[in-house]
Amino acid sequence: MSELPKSWTTTSLYDLLIALESGSRPRGGVRGINGGIPSVGGEHLNYNGGFDFGSVKYVPVKFADLMTKGHIRPNDILIVKDGATTGKTSFVGADFPYKKAVVNEHVFICRTTDRTNSRFLFRYLMSKEGQDRILENFKGSAQGGINQTFAPNTAVPLAPLPEQKRIVTKLEQLLERVERSRKKLERIPKLLKRFRQSVLAAACSGKLTEDWREENEIEENAVVLLDRIVKERKEIFDKEYADYKKGKAKKPDSDFILEYNQHDFIHSWATAKLDNLIYIAARIGWRGLKAEEYTKEGPLFLAVYALNYGEEVDYRDAYRISKWRYEESPEIQLQENDILLCKDGAGIGKLGIITQLPEKATVNSSLLVIRGREPFIPKFLFYFLCSPKLQSIAKERITGSATPHLFQKDIRELYLDIPPIEEQQEIIRRVEQLFTVADKIEQRYTKAAKQVEKLTQSILAKAFRGELVPQDPNDPPASELLAKIKEERELAQVKTSTKRKKDFRRAGEPASVLLERIKIEKTKMESEKASGKNKEQRRVDEPARRRK
């Protein structure tokens, strides 16, 4: 801990608390309980010291009434006690939305004495230094956590009480301004997402290149292009079919059958069904790999985590599989410009495009491989699949409840507005130009967001070094405050002990007499217990004595 002002002292978190407790849940959990008393878990605490109750869980009222511990009160400090978010800390302030609530078994309640400003302690515990002190007590693996021993083992700084109040007041002013900046920054990713969707929507509807069409003559419009493709494919089919009749080849696919019409509004465009315009494949009849089947070397094995909405595929965290596993499914061995689409699970609709493929790669059973054929430039097909129009249609086609699923036929039956090749090239150029602008803004946002986070931690660090507000020499030193807190804790423990023994006490009886009588009662109980043992032993020995 950094050097503190002379009037400050250091103590343990435990010394500043009058309660350290966690709650519980009914046997069988809280699933299916739609009302009662809100039960706060680690997922409800956020990293800004507040709460997120987007998904509230409850315990029955009767169960909450029987809970002796875990009831939330104003000014309580809540700390996640286990799992990946261990140490996450929130404060129960005036804006807490529930008059009555409890915590579950994964959250600690830290309740301070009246002689400590609870917000002062809370702000320290959510600072980087405070989080480090808490996590020094982490035990176990990734799913480990902290137990009640973390409180006596967590060192905290203690300022004089008047200075605590001044620090909290100053902190609230500064952090409120930082929070306003953070909330404004949080709007940027949403705005950028909407901007990118607007660009794609304009690109796929023809609005993005409306001026380009007016200024440029098109050599081959989309309908003529599709007519030519049908003619060329029909010639290949007829030749392969003749070989098939002679027994020299297998029966060819009827890929020359296309469904298309001239676009309703743009003369040079066509509207066509994707079937037979794309190659689409997936890993079929395969249940996946066991953990021991992954290898340190070999082809890359991509899953949904490698995808994002409308970005290049990320190879960094890909697993690897053996060469024979890769070669058993040649139809999904990836090529440059392949498009990957997540077809099921939570990531359904996520897309990525293969660019600069670093080495051999394949996909797991959750991904579709889509490969554009004529009349597509691959990047244009990718932008179309990323567009809001397709995404909304895809969501309508999703079937299943527990695990949503998108079938190959759902993609094949989609209709696409197809521009001429020259216009596809211009659309790609303009989309990439606008996306580059958005990327630069996003980079600036990321940098600014990190600066805001650093600013928050910088303010907190300054506060708990005693540098945020000046010290007042008239303030009683924190050592005196700590001594009074310890004195009050000891007195409270005596009162608690006395309360437990109230059945022995008589009206007006002095404490000394009470203690003496307790000793007598204790001696009597021990004597009776010994006498009972002796009687039991005589009962056991009696048959043997009679036989003699």
Image (cartoon, rainbow, N blue to C red):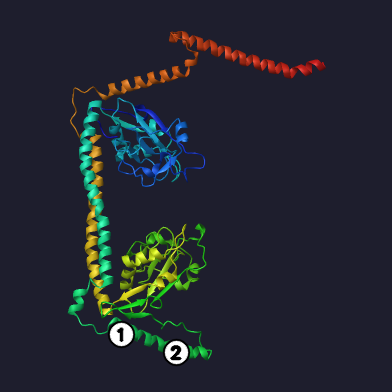
Q: Is residue 411 above or below residue 445?
A: below
Local crowd size for mark 2, using a 10 Å CA cut-off: few (<14), some (14–19), many (≥20): few
Measured as percent of width and height from the top left, residue 289 is found at: 50, 61
> Which residue is located at x 20 percent, y 39 percent?
174
Measured as percent of width and height from the top left, residue 133 is found at: 35, 37
Q: Quadrant of the C terminus?
A: top right
- Answer whether residue 89 is visible to the viewer in this image: yes
Q: Is residue 277 above or below residue 29?
A: below
- The residue that disc 1 covers is 224
> Which residue is located at x 39 percent, y 64 percent?
396
Q: Is residue 259 above or below residue 165?
A: below
- The residue that disc 2 covers is 238
Instruction: Say whether marks 2 and 1 touch (CB < 8 Å).
Output: no
| Residue 530: mark | none
Local crowd size for mark 1, using a 10 Å CA cut-off: few (<14), some (14–19), many (≥20): some
- 489 or 29: which is nearer to us? 29
Measured as percent of width and height from the top left, residue 138 is found at: 41, 39
Q: Quadrant of the N terminus?
A: top left
**The residue positioned farthest toward the right in the image shown:** 548
Specify the amino acid type for callout 1.
Val
